Image: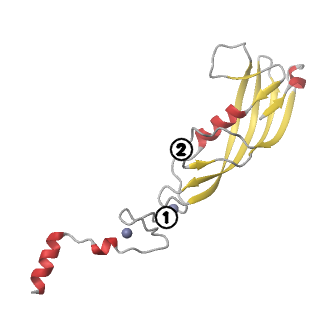
Amino acid sequence: MKVDISDILKVNGASLDVDREEVLKGFDELEDDFVIDMPVKLKCRFTNMGDIVKMDGRLKVDYLVKCSRCLKDVRSSLEVDLEEEFAREGQIEDEDCYVYSDKVVLLDKVLKDNIILNLPTRHMCRVDCKGLCPKCGAELNTKRCSCNEEEMDPRMEALKNFFNK
Ligand SMILES: [Zn+2]
Ligand SMILES: [Zn+2]
């Protein structure tokens, strides 16, 4: 996502409001658990602060994630408040700092960083998801398997047989 900020660079204190949405590519570094192929919605304001350009706003994005317990796909969404600073390209040595050129701010990295940082580590399709049976793989929200019933301590089994005699 590119934003032309050439107008506000001419005047100290000038600002520019942006309302955009765009599909961002390159979320490959994420585990398979997340799929982010929906547009990232951005509403923000860029302000020329002299040495730096400040960005304040909010992003919103929908994504698919696998339930940590039953592995079902769940659609969820994320909103993040943004407060970032951009330095002019070539002006600073700190490589971690976001930069702008004479005309444009490239926002892909700053948006991706904020999204990845704020994705939840665990996601469940519902609060009481029962997950999968570790033995037969049955989805326990909708099915009932007999793994637990069949399983019996061998000592108990011996005792049961003893009393049945
Ligand atoms: Zn689940
Ligand atoms: Zn089972």
78 w.r.t. 50: above or below? below
In contact (CB < 8 Å): disc 1 and disc 2: no
Residue 164 locus on image (x, y percent): 13, 86
Residue 55 against residue 145 in the figure, above or below: above
SS at circle 1: loop
User: In percent of the image, x 49 and y 64: which residue is there?
Assistant: 129
Q: To which quarter of the image does residue 148 belong? A: bottom left
Q: Residue at the spot x=71%, y=34% of the render?
A: 108
Q: Name the residue carrying label 1.
A: 129
- Quadrant in the picture for residue 140: bottom left
| Residue at which label 2 appears | 31
Quadrant of the image occupied by residue 81: top right
| Ligand 2: quadrant of the figure | bottom left
Query: Is 155 left, or right, of 85 in this rendering?
Result: left
**Ligand 1 closer than 8 Å to label 2 CB:** no
Give, as a three-letter code, the residue at label 1. Answer: Cys
Residue at 81% from the left image edge and 26% from the top image edge: 104
Side (left or right) of 131 relative to 14 = left
* Gap between marks 1 and 2 measured at Cα: 21 Å
Q: Position of residue 89 (x, y in %)?
A: 74, 17
- With 147 as the anchor, is 164 left or right in this view? left
> Looking at the rendering, in which quadrant would you find the C terminus?
bottom left
In the figure, 3 relative to 163: above or below? above
Task: Kindly identify the amino acid type of the residue bearing the numbered disc 2.
Answer: Glu
